[in-house]
Image (cartoon, helix red, strand yellow):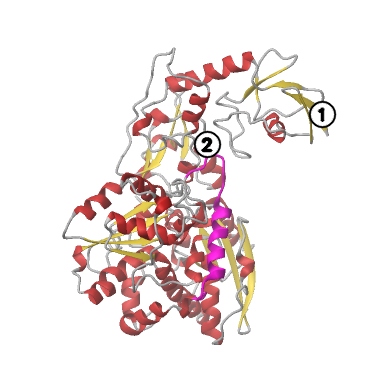
Amino acid sequence: MVNLTIDGRAVSVTEGTSILDAAAQVGIKIPTLCYLRELNEIGACRICVVEIEGIDQLVAACNNTVLEGMVVRTNSPKVRVARRMNMELLLATHDSECTSCVRSGNCTLQTLANDLGISELPYEKRLMHDPWDKSFPLIRNNDKCVNCLRCIQVCEKIQGLGVWDLANRATHTSVNVRGGGSIAESDCTLCGQCITHCPTGALRERDDTGRVFDALADPDKVVVVQIAPAVRAAWGESLGLARGEATVGRLVAALRQMGVDYVFDTDFSADLTIMEEGSELLHKLAHRDENTFPMFTSCCPGWVRYVKAVRPEFTAQLSTSKSPGQMFGAVTKSYFAELKGIDPHNIFCVEIMPCTAKKAEVAIPTMVDACGDPDVDVSITTREVDRMIRAEHIDATTLPEEDFDDPLGTATGAGVIFGATGGVMEAALRTAYHVVTGETPRPDAFSAVRGLEGWKEATFDLAGTPVRVAVVSGLANAGKLLDALAAGEVSYDFVEVMACPGGCAGGGGQPIHDGEELAGVRGDVLWGLDRKAKLRNSYENPSIEAIYRDYLGEPLSERAEELLHTDHFAWSMH
């Protein structure tokens, strides 16, 4: 153990502990801006500087380790002067129009500046005004960038992509697309992890809420909204609701208060996805000699973009099943439109997703199978729907519980767990087991695929046939798995991949809590909803039974193939 003194307090910590962590152990929170544990410990922002007795120069607490007998002062006059000056220098190159920034009130830079009492700057403002394609789903504003390098490290270390890099030198240094090209020409998968790890408003999703408000104001439009599984675990975080209070029923009520005509559950189409994808897997297993394995899930658009851009040799192994959101749009503008006698061209279909890549998915030219219009008209993130609720002056804390509309509002626990890593795999195996054996699986028969590990694998017995599966979250982990497959080091029948660590619960469109990773907490909410569900298997959903009986026929039927499946070769990333 190493013994030292921090702000007059005796501290004993293990060797190799950073000054930042040592201080935290005795309740001293040294402010940071660029720091991300194990990802970005570079001391670039100089906000975490501290004074060490016997050393003239201040040092960064985040990347300097403790020494025996060290005496540390975290807020001495010398430290306060330096910290304030460093913040003022950062603000001198920062667009401080906070009232027009989506991160206002949830910005680490803004919070630190307020804490330091900075109300005016002694330096002249110098902004970059770099151009950016505002039509792309991910928006970068370098006038709000503090060059913390978080986005570079997250993209490279967590996602294995390296889309971002430093450009130029000295006072002209900025972060931009690696190689100097446009973001649309890059391999960006739109996972959004750079957005959720940015401490300021330099990165955000394209705001599509205006299109939704326009549709709500159009008397000729029938506005249909679907709510994705992971949204229900996070939507209340920025609206003052405790996790137990932010029920999906309250979100349904908020959307109806806005004027939405029909509110449905994407969990329904998650069940539909399982019926199609599970049947697709069983068909391939029955004709093993005619297929290449493993079959990969295709419900994560960030993962599909990754395959298309980085590993196109695996494109043919993606399931042809559309994502639940796209399946929902297709059945809304066909099956539902016929049931209600609505002209499908008048339906405006909105999906609320924990995801930024969905904004690109809804614009894929081939996703127009129902009536020639886009199956889903617009995709908004959890953050965007929260902004809409605030813009409509709706007090989320007083909302009642309301049910989804029928017939696309009934779902099972299997649909709910789509939002957690391992959930798609478990849901598919539950149904596959039933199809093969005619029996209902034990509730936790396939729980081995749960958990936040980046790469999990298991083998399950389906009526005497061993099925080898793997579950991966985070694209760097996906890349390692693909390398292992290509080298013949591993072999699987079915693989679930989610671009975001922890799955959709940790999606790039979820509420931002700087320095906190909440995918596990949100995922636990979804697993809890599954345990409480009356129906836990997709094939038990009465609305799924009805749509196959009355409209689709059976999984993989001609009509199901037309509406619910897609050709991944029919569109290009760039």
Determine the secondary structure under disc 1: strand
Identify the magenta region.
512-537
Picture coordinates of residue 244, whole percent (x, y)? 52, 56
Give the numbered dot on residue 328: none
The residue closer to the viewer here, 483 or 56, is 56
Would you identify the image quadrant in which residue 142 lies?
top left
Determine the secondary structure under disc 2: helix
Q: Are marks 2 and 1 in contact (CB under 8 Å)?
A: no
Give the numbered dot on residue 150: 2
User: Which numbered disc, 2 or 1, marks the residue that appears first in the sequence?
Assistant: 1
Which residue is painted at 40% across and 81% down in the image? Answer: 545
The residue closer to the viewer here, 259 or 316, is 259
Q: Is residue 49 above or below residue 544?
A: above
**Local crowd size for mark 2, using a 10 Å CA cut-off: few (<14), some (14–19), many (≥20):** many
Magenta span contains residue 281: no
The residue carrying mark 1 is 3
Q: Is residue 83 left or right of residue 132?
A: right
Picture coordinates of residue 438, whole percent (x, y)? 54, 87
Marks 2 and 1, how far apart in space? 32 Å
The residue type indicated by label 1 comes to Asn
Residue 540 appears in the picture as rendered: yes
**Local crowd size for mark 1, using a 10 Å CA cut-off: few (<14), some (14–19), many (≥20):** some
Q: Is residue 35 left or right of residue 191?
A: right
Q: Is residue 337 above or below residue 145?
A: below
The residue type indicated by label 2 comes to Arg
**What quarter of the picture does the N terminus occupy?**
top right
Would you identify the image quadrant in which residue 447 lies?
bottom right
Residue 293 appears in the picture as rendered: no
The residue closer to the viewer here, 335 or 264, is 264
User: Seen from this angle, which residue lies furthest bottom?
Assistant: 438
